[in-house]
Image (cartoon, rainbow, N blue to C red):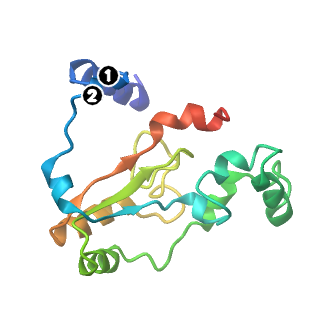
Amino acid sequence: MTVQEKYLKIAEEVIEKGPYKPDWLTFADYEVPKWFRNAKFGIFIHWGLFSIPAFRNEWYSRNMYIQSMEEWEHHRQTFGEHTKFGYKDFIPMFTAPNFEPKEWVKLFKKAGARYVMPVAEHHDGFQMYDSEISEWNVKNMAMKRDVLGELKEAIQEEDLIFCESNHRVEHAFFFGHG
């Protein structure tokens, strides 16, 4: 059994035992946690590999391969033909030498934030954390740092609530041009 298969099996077991099913009715009685309602202000960090082309939005990795999209032409004119320079070629550029999570979190706290929620993995599948599931992550490639782990540590040191957002569930929709 591969590492990926092991984690998929664990996820399936947790889903099976859990209170939620893959339908909207399951969530009808869900109550937002009190801490969240009381927090009032938090920071959502939507940062990832898509920040390198820095064109339009975080859907660049999808739209750059659809000829009818503005990103397709922008990519061709800015970086060259898609067959020679694809989305994966942005990875070595994602170094963020000025990334200072402790400084970020001090600023968030000073602004009055009560929680911080970075995106762990966007639809592009590039993980912002150290992972044994996939080599396509910020620790293994690019920055050689565990961005999510470092942010979590800094957030907890400042007594803020750490959350994470994971967009993995929509990968098929995203790359299937949904």
For the point 28% across and 54% down, the residue is 163
For the point 62% across and 67% down, the residue is 93
Q: Amino acid at mark 1?
A: Leu
Provide residue 3's location: percent of width, then percent of height.
Answer: 39, 31
- Tell me the element at label 2: loop
Q: Is residue 40 left or right of residue 151?
A: left
Image: 54 above or below 110 = above
Q: Nearer the viewer, residue 31 or 130?
A: 31
Q: Nearer the viewer, residue 14 or 135?
A: 14
Provide residue 155's location: percent of width, then percent of height.
Answer: 24, 67
Residue 107 in sight in this render: yes
For the point 69% across and 57% down, the residue is 89
In the rendered image, the residue lying farthest to the top is: 16
For the point 48% across and 52% down, the residue is 137
Q: Is residue 71 left or right of residue 162?
A: right
Numbered circle sitting on residue 10: none
Residue 146 in sight in this render: no
Residue denoted by label 1: 25
Q: Is residue 56 left or right of residue 26?
A: right
Q: Amino acid at mark 2?
A: Ala
Kindly report the distance in space between the C-alpha atoms of the residues bearing marks 2 and 1: 5 Å
- Tell me the element at label 1: helix
Q: Residues within 10 Å of mark 2 (few under 14, many from 20)?
A: few
Q: Nearer the viewer, residue 23 or 65?
A: 23
Residue denoted by label 2: 28
Instruction: Residue 118: name its quadrant.
Output: bottom left
Q: How many marks?
A: 2
Marks 2 and 1: CB-CB under 8 Å?
yes
Q: Nearer the viewer, residue 83 or 1?
A: 83
Locate the N terminus by quadrant. Answer: top left
Locate the C terminus by quadrant. Answer: top right
Q: Residues within 10 Å of mark 1 (few under 14, many from 20)?
A: few
